Amino acid sequence: MTVLQPIRKAAIIGAGQMGLGIAYVSVVHAKIPITIHDPSERVLSSALEKYKSLISRDIAKSRLTQTEADEALSKFQTLQGDGTGENGQGAALKDDTDLIIEAIPEIPELKLGLFKRLGQLLPESTILGSNTSSISITKLAASAVSSLSKEEGKRSSERVIGIHYFNPVPQMKLVEIIPALQTSQSTIDRAKAFGKACKKEVTTSSDSPGFIANAILMPMINEAIMVLEKGIATPADIDLTFKLGMSHPMGPLTLADLIGLDTCLNIQRVLHNETGDSKYRPSGLLIRMVDAGWVGRKGGKGFYEYDNKGNKLD
Ligand SMILES: NC(=O)c1ccc[n+]([C@@H]2O[C@H](COP(=O)([O-])OP(=O)(O)OC[C@H]3O[C@@H](n4cnc5c(N)ncnc54)[C@H](O)[C@@H]3O)[C@@H](O)[C@H]2O)c1
């Protein structure tokens, strides 16, 4: 039996809603130290506040002791920049980092550029994971070989993998693992073991646009927005139909607000571009709402309005 190299230290790139949640379960459940990188100082200070409030909530619910909470605080570090020397201070990522998980916006050029720099910067023992909802992991793996020799390039692409958590990460019990065509079996095994260490169930999807979850979810959300756009029903009635008629815990428009309307639009654009299938075309209303800066719960307004703690207003 082969012994898997353990993940002892990780870095998260992007401290938005997903990056912070991934950092939290990595420290609290997988019990490893985390550095979280983001170009925005404002995002980093808000991430630290949210991290502390997640800890306080877990203490209040007796899920963490004070000693565990102190340990979790000492294992969490924030750093400005993206870790590779872009958008901030120098290349802060260290050779002894066993795992990187990027959670930057769902924009192909941004992620491809990041994987190119990560491929050059980090030793081939470091797993390069992406929390992308839809972008091809095979393309990210190909980007991680740029300017390396053929043999180094092959090994560099073998350590790239999709590690797709769900929102909100501390509550949702799933991780979707997506190997690229190039990914090695040991990378798959290490990524699955890490997902389980974060106390998640693991599913595996091949590298196809939207993988399992978003290939099914995004067309449903888009159809719900089109029903609204056509004036067929109000947001409240569309959501209530799914809650009470189909036993979904929340309706599709509430879920779209939670995911982020910018993220939904970016995912739909990737699905549409990658498949060429018109069923994935984003609705005009979604495009206009993102144009208006109405990105959902994280921005205070989407299909509903929210206070600065993210609670829905009546
Ligand atoms: N929101 C969801 O429900 C959800 C669920 C699963 C996966 N995802 C995926 O996770 C990723 C992040 O989504 P999110 O909802 O956390 O987005 P978000 O907008 O909350 O956070 C993105 C963060 O990335 C930072 N950033 C921007 N450009 C960067 C760069 N070049 N380098 C480093 N950081 C940069 C931003 O400052 C921001 O803090 C996306 O790929 C998304 O598809 C999102």
Image (cartoon, rainbow, N blue to C red):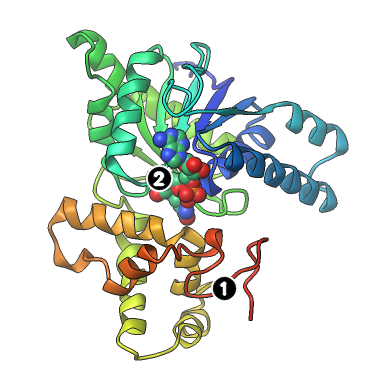
Q: Which mark is residue 105?
A: 2
- Reading the image, the residue beneath label 1 is 305
Q: Residue at x 26, y 66 (%)?
A: 282
**Residue type for callout 2:** Pro
- Foreground residue among 141 and 185: 141
- Percent across and percent down for residue 286 are 34, 69
Counting from the top left corner in percent of width and height, residue 8 is at: 59, 20
Nearest to the observer: residue 313 or residue 152? 313
132 vs 259: above or below: above
Q: Is mark 2 within 8 Å of ligand 1?
A: yes
Question: To which quarter of the image does residue 154 belong?
Answer: top left
**Residue 124, image x and y in percent?**
37, 13
Image location (x, y in percent) of residue 84: 43, 21
Q: CA distance from mark 2 to mark 1?
A: 22 Å
- Quadrant (top left, top right, bottom left, bottom right) of the C terminus: bottom right
Q: Is residue 215 left or right of residue 306?
A: left
Q: Amino acid at mark 1?
A: Glu
Quadrant of the frame with the N terminus: top left
Instruction: Decide if residue 256 is on the left or right side of residue 182.
Output: right
Residue at 22% x, 14% y is: 147
Please tell me which of labels 2 and 1 falls first in the chain: 2
**Is residue 231 visible to us here?**
yes
Q: Is residue 174 positioned above or below 131 on the image?
A: below
